Amino acid sequence: MGSSGINAEYMGSSGINAEYMGSSGINAEYMGRYFGNPRNYLEIVSLYGYSFSVFVPCAVIAVVPSEAVRWLSVAASLLLSAGFLVRNLWLTLPAEARWKGGIWTLGVLIVGHLSIALGFKLYFFYKD
């Protein structure tokens, strides 16, 4: 910690999280346009914001001094959050559009979502 009392590691990982949310919306919008299934950027960013709200209780549970409980809470939050995205981004597409390009878009977004959940666990929910 520097003289200002702000941990630079947390500031860096917060910036990565914000960049991920913004870039995921842009990626989803352009992949949707490419595959002929356009979605509104603000709708996608709103869905991501709602999907990340499940990590708030996860942060509270991360106070428990058990590494197994922390991993379980992150895994449960990831599954709930990814399920929310699948329900709202993929299942709302017409059936033919799901397999045309929606599956690739969803796959890219879920892999990114998995990466950000691991980042939460390793940077925010880590206890020495």
Image (cartoon, rainbow, N blue to C red):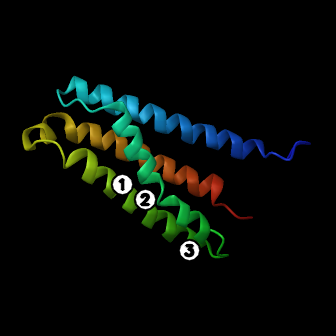
**Label 3 or label 2, whichever comes before in sequence order:** 3
Contact flag, marks 1 and 2 (Cβ < 8 Å)? yes
Q: Quadrant of residue 96?
A: top left
The percent coordinates of residue 88 (x first, y second) are 27, 49
The residue at 26%/33% (across/down) is 39
Asked if residue 36 shows in the view, the reply is yes
Q: Secondary structure at mark 1?
A: helix
Image side of residue 52 versus residue 41, left or right: right
Callout 1 crowding tier (Cα within 10 Å): few <14, some 14–19, many ≥20? many
Q: Is residue 123 above or below residue 58?
A: above
The percent coordinates of residue 66 (x first, y second) are 63, 76
Closer to viewer: mark 1 or mark 3: 1
Callout 2 crowding tier (Cα within 10 Å): few <14, some 14–19, many ≥20? many
Distance between the alpha carbons at the discs numbered 1 and 2 = 6 Å
**Label 1 or label 3, whichever comes before in sequence order:** 3
Closer to viewer: mark 3 or mark 2: 2
Q: Is residue 25 above or below residue 128?
A: above
Quadrant (top left/top right/bottom left/bottom right) for the C terminus: bottom right
Please give the residue where the numbered disc 3 appears in the rendered image: 68
Q: Secondary structure at mark 3?
A: helix
Asked if residue 111 shows in the view, the reply is no
Image side of residue 88 versus residue 124, left or right: left
The residue at 55%/74% (across/down) is 69
The residue at 70%/64% (across/down) is 127
Q: Secondary structure at mark 2?
A: helix
Contact flag, marks 1 and 3 (Cβ < 8 Å)? no
Q: Label 1 sits on what residue type?
A: Ala
Please give the residue where the numbered disc 2 appears in the rendered image: 78
Q: Which mark is residue 82?
A: 1
Q: Label 3 sits on what residue type?
A: Ala
The percent coordinates of residue 5 (x first, y second) are 86, 47
